[in-house]
Image: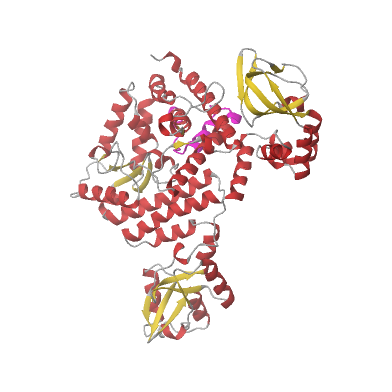
Amino acid sequence: MSVLEQKAFISDIPPFNQLLSHEVEAVADAMDIAYFKKGEQLIQQDSSPKALYIIIKGIVQETYGDEMVSAYVSQDSFDAMSLLEGKSKNNFTVQEELICYVLPKEIFLILIQHNELFKEFYYQDLSKRLNVLLEQRNSKELASFMVAKIKDTYVHPPVFVDANISVYEAVQTMTARKANFVLVKNNNDIGIVTDKDLRDMVLKRYSIDDPVGNIATYNLISMCCKDFLLHALLVMLRHSIKHLLIKKDNLVIGVLEQIDLLSYLSNHTRLVAVQIDRAENKEQLKVASQNMTNMVKSFQASGMKIGYMMQWVNELNLQVFKKLYSFVAPSELLENSCLIVMGSEGRGEQILKTDQDNAMILRDGFVYEGLENITKELTETLVDFGYPPCPGKIMVNNSRWCQPLKNFKAQIFEWVIESQEPLLDLAIFCDAKAVAGDETLLKKAKQYLYDRLQDNQAFFSYFAKPTLSFETPLGFFTTFIVDRSKEDQLDIKKGGIFPIVHGVRSLALEHKITQTNTLKRIKYLTQKGIIDKAFAADLIEALAFMISIRLYFELEKMKQGEPYNNYINPSQLNKLERDLLKDSFKIVNDFKKFIIYHFKLDRLS
């Protein structure tokens, strides 16, 4: 292999990708290529290694006594910690004939001494390594504002008034339309009156009975909805204005505000929130809901941490559901019902739209004629918004999930006494979160559940058992176990996300923790001393990383026009991502062992 090939190989491997050009040169000059046969021992326990090994081809197994600790494959390096600590804790043996680079210890230690980023790699925990990954993504995948157009951002609907109406009437119109401006029609001219104009008017003691046309600003600058946002920003700055008339086919379709344009530079959150708040009908709310996907893309491209992203999306999702319910449900129904979301929506862990999981609890004794039509409209509208129907029909249009409180209590009682069943419905209900209406109805239902359980350890064991339903897709040599029928992909939900979510849910139910979000449940369990603090931190980071990896592949499939699912292809990850995924799966396995021990699952038949 030539020196150029050596440099290219090394430069792609963390943490060597952090080296400066002269350091890469030094590494390439100092490295030798070595060959070892299967069965050869490279490093012996308690010995002092003289070099760092970087695998080109082959497999090396790390063991402690008779127990395998890890396995190393192409692009992996070992054993840096032995070089730093002066002694190896484990044995390293060639499992499959090996071709590797050998970097002398002296050169390795010089790099550690002079390159802080290189040094940090070997001392950082999972959390810090994830941050490094996010920084790498951030530099590669920044959202492109340069090509965004005005139609890609939020344009306020036009609110027109006649120039001859009073200022008082104009303010009434602004309040009714939840607008902070009105467009004033004055013969063939269009002017604008903003909140600032009204404040100035008051300070100048103008009468609110004067015509609004007297305080309007005319000769407004307009742009086409197909113009670039960057151009719009330059026009605003050049003319010291904060509003632009936006036209399509020479007709005014709205107003672009500078604050919304600047908000677009950072993320789409405020725009979606404004659209939801100002939606006056289902069609406008649908537009806001659909824009959430663009918001997620922006978040992911800018490297936002997955925990924060889930919080933003969850809050906006709840606002969509709440607003929609207010559109379809009369006030009498709103006062006597509680609309709830469950599953990933209830946990606040849904980022892209997935199957609906919702229900409605009615006040005992309350009957509403036409309820079936309302629940049908609610479900069908959500489908139209992009939330697919639940295959298991766990939706409000299913009478089983739209019942009085006493019926829900009866259902909960059945779930508890039939503890040898999979208890999928109860698991989903445990994650229920109130969206609209009287949330005390949900609180009463959950309190009834906690009262029925008491200290029923047999129930908790059966409830926790599904944590072990799926094998972790990590092989003996820490290679990924993929599904050949799915183009060498693996199901990251079954293999990694679900075991953590359900195991934590089981612990939360046992200890009557009312939080529904998995990350928050873990923190509460840590405070109660149920989970070790250090392990809890790893658990949180592992779950967050797997969710972020799933999101990455979901967005890639969306980009290709394919339906997104829980399958990911490990071969499409870079070296650091593959290592982090392996670490995450190892944490999943450790958590499964904890669940087995805690709930005594090894004693179940």
Q: Quadrant of the C terminus?
A: top left
Q: How many marks?
A: 0
Q: Position of residue 586 (x, y in %)?
A: 55, 26
Q: Which residues are magenta?
A: 508-535
Rendered location of residue 369, percent (x, y): 18, 49
Is residue 280 something that shows in the picture? yes
Q: Is residue 513 magenta?
A: yes
> At which x and y percent is residue 219?
48, 83
Quarter-wise, where is residue 151 in the image? Answer: bottom left
Q: Quadrant of residue 239?
A: bottom right
Percent from the top left, x then y, of residue 237? 58, 73
Q: Nearer the viewer, residue 438 or 419?
A: 419
At a point 50% along the width and 43% down the height, the residue shown is 552
Judge whether residue 444 is colored magenta: no
Quarter location, residue 428: top left
As drawn, which residue projects farthest toward the left? 369
Q: Is residue 459 above or below residue 220?
A: above
